[in-house]
């Protein structure tokens, strides 16, 4: 179905997440790249050597969760915006996501937004904690959001409430 | 008549890289660009490019144009760039006729020529496909990203290849609603990461769908789409209507290389490369010595390959003119290696097959 809709199945998504113990330890990258295409900036960008593509630029990236520090440099470097950071170390009830977001106007810290799944359907509420848009991110801002834990494998995007657009 | 050492037609990714490469070997280069701005299609690509560092991956296309132009500037008067200059003819004595500023007609005679003229958008036949509001997706991208003009309010994108999904995403960034992306093929042609970006914005991607007709009197008011079977035949009863004021057609590109055909270069239809292409050597030289081709004009690929091909063509064209740098073999292998890497994966299957068919 993925090749017909662009929406990865739950099984596919699960293969890209590290084990829960790792998520609970601290931030870690989830690299949702499933297709062999000639692309390797994630490997080049990673200061920890945690993302490996290898000699064939077409290989699908492999993230080593023991090396990944969750620094998030790869998030705004991935041309496919396929990488996000998850962090389950902050709370027993919620998990933090850092996702790339290239739409204006940007949300503001503290704002409640609608959490969307991989098909763009509303699944939960999410709270914006931080919006980072430094020059190094080259106009791919990264938004940190807090989401209920049970949506860990569903949440992937967000939409601002209509009224928030002013 | 003006005489030049190396003439490069087109200042897109292939043309600019060819110019940098040739000038760095010592050749004197004149570049013709038909637009008012150099960079070809790069200047409207606001998304980050794929590939590796060597093709400026993860930089936005529009910024890559800037990087390449800055490099060009390093060669000072060894490179001249002529804007608003359209090559309109290419003759046996290597004379290229040029229309400058749409009024002045002049001639350039070159010892060697690299044709980096790019591609044009394919069209799709359906009733009322000439209604205002129906555009090529590339044209819409130019309107939005070069001129800052919204093409309309609600868009139906026809074609789920890379251009279709990228332009859809950029339409949404410009605040325009994209109601759906459809494609007659049973699978999405675009890189799936691009498709996923759209999907999670809630835009449905409808594979095995085509446009049945456009509806409107003075301009586009609606589009009727339907499902197709595995032989691409419409399935009756599956019609759906979308009220839209814009339809973007993104059903592929064809190489733009009539100049080479006019010059008498040996051409061949190669489906895998999306049209008629010149036969050429591994060094991008056509059947006529001293005439080279690079980028989409030699077959439709990504900008990353166009850049690598440009560097290779520029290096080899300059070498043939006597400008052989010390590291010639090393650079030649490097660019060929880049092309091999970019074409080596499953998405490169078609290109590799096309390359075999178009080798001299």
Image (cartoon, coloured by chain):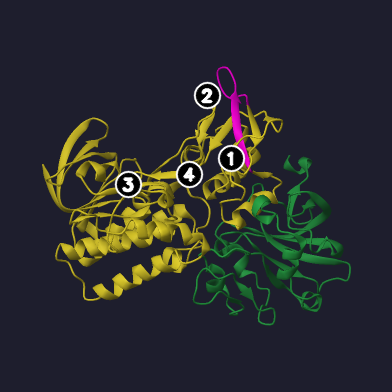
Residue bearing mark 2: B131
Answer yes or no: do the residues labelled 1 and 4 have beta carbons within 8 Å? no
Q: Name the residue: 59% across, 26% down.
A: B214
- Range covered by the magenta-colored residues: B208-222
Residue bearing mark 3: B117
Between discs 4 and 3, the one toward the N terminus: 3
Which quadrant holds residue A141? bottom right
Cα–Cα gap, marks 4 and 2: 20 Å
Please state which of residues B21 and B305 is positioned toward the viewer in this rendering.
B305
Tell which tag, 2 or 1, sits nearer the viewer. 1
Which quadrant holds residue B216? top right
Cα–Cα gap, marks 2 and 3: 29 Å
Please state which of residues B262 and A152 is positioned toward the viewer in this rendering.
B262
Residue bearing mark 4: B252
Between discs 2 and 3, the one toward the N terminus: 3
> How packed is label 2: few (under 14 Cα within 10 Å), some, or many (20 or more)?
some
The chain letter under disc 3 is B
Which chain is displayed in green in the rendered image? A
With B192 as the anchor, is B322 left or right in this view? left
Cα–Cα gap, marks 3 and 1: 32 Å
Tell which tag, 1 or 4, sits nearer the viewer. 1
Residue lying at the far bottom of the rendered structure: A66
Count of numbered marks: 4
> Element under label 4?
loop
With B7 as the anchor, is A120 left or right in this view? right
Residue bearing mark 1: B232
């Amino acid at each position: 179905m993925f090749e017909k809709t662009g929406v990865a199945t739950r099984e596919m998504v699960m293969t890209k997440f590290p084990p829960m113990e790792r998520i609970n330890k601290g931030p870690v990258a989830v690299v949702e790249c499933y297709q062999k295409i000639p692309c390797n900036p994630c490997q080049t960008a990673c200061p920890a050597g945690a993302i490996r593509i290898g000699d064939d630029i077409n290989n699908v990236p492999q993230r080593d969760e023991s090396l990944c520090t969750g620094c998030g440099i790869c998030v705004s470097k991935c041309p496919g915006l396929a990488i996000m950071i998850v962090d389950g170390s902050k709370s027993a009830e919620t998990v933090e996501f850092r996702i790339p977001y290239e739409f204006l106007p940007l949300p503001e810290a503290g704002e409640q937004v609608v959490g969307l799944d991989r098909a763009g359907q509303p699944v939960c509420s999410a709270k914006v904690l931080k919006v980072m848009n430094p020059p190094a991110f080259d106009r791919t801002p990264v938004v940190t959001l807090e989401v209920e834990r049970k949506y860990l494998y569903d949440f992937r995007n967000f939409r601002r409430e209509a009224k928030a657009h002013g | 008549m003006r005489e030049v050492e190396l003439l490069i037609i087109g200042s897109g990714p292939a043309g600019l890289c060819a110019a940098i490469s040739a000038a760095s070997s010592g050749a004197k280069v004149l570049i013709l660009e038909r637009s008012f701005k150099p960079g070809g299609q790069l200047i409207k690509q606001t998304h980050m490019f794929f590939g590796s560092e060597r093709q400026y991956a993860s930089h936005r296309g529009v910024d890559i144009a800037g990087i390449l132009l800055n490099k060009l500037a390093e060669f000072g008067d060894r490179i001249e760039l002529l804007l608003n200059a359209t090559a309109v003819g290419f003759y046996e004595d290597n004379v290229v006729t040029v229309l400058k500023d749409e009024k002045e007609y002049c001639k350039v005679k070159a010892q060697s020529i690299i044709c980096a003229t790019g591609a044009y958008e394919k069209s799709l036949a359906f009733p009322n496909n000439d209604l205002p509001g129906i555009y090529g997706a590339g044209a819409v991208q130019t309107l939005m990203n070069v001129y800052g003009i919204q093409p309309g309010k609600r868009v139906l994108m026809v074609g789920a290849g890379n251009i279709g999904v990228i332009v859809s995403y950029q339409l949404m960034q410009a605040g325009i609603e994209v109601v759906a992306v459809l494609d007659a093929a049973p699978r999405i042609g675009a890189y799936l990461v691009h498709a996923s970006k759209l999907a999670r914005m809630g835009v449905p991607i409808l594979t095995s769908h085509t446009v049945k007709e456009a509806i409107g009197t003075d301009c586009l008011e609606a589009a009727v789409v339907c499902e197709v079977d595995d032989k691409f035949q419409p399935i009756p009863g599956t019609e759906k209507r979308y009220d839209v004021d814009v339809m973007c057609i993104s059903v592929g590109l064809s190489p733009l290389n009539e100049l080479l055909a006019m010059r008498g270069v040996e051409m061949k239809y190669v489906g895998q490369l999306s049209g008629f292409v010149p036969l050429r050597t591994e060094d991008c030289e056509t059947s006529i010595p001293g005439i080279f081709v690079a980028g989409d004009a030699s077959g439709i690929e990504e900008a990353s390959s166009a850049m690598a091909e440009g560097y290779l063509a520029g290096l080899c064209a300059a070498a043939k003119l006597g400008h052989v740098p010390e590291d010639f073999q090393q650079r030649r292998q490097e660019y060929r290696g880049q092309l091999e890497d970019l074409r080596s994966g499953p998405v490169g299957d078609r290109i590799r097959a096309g390359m075999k068919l178009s080798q001299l």
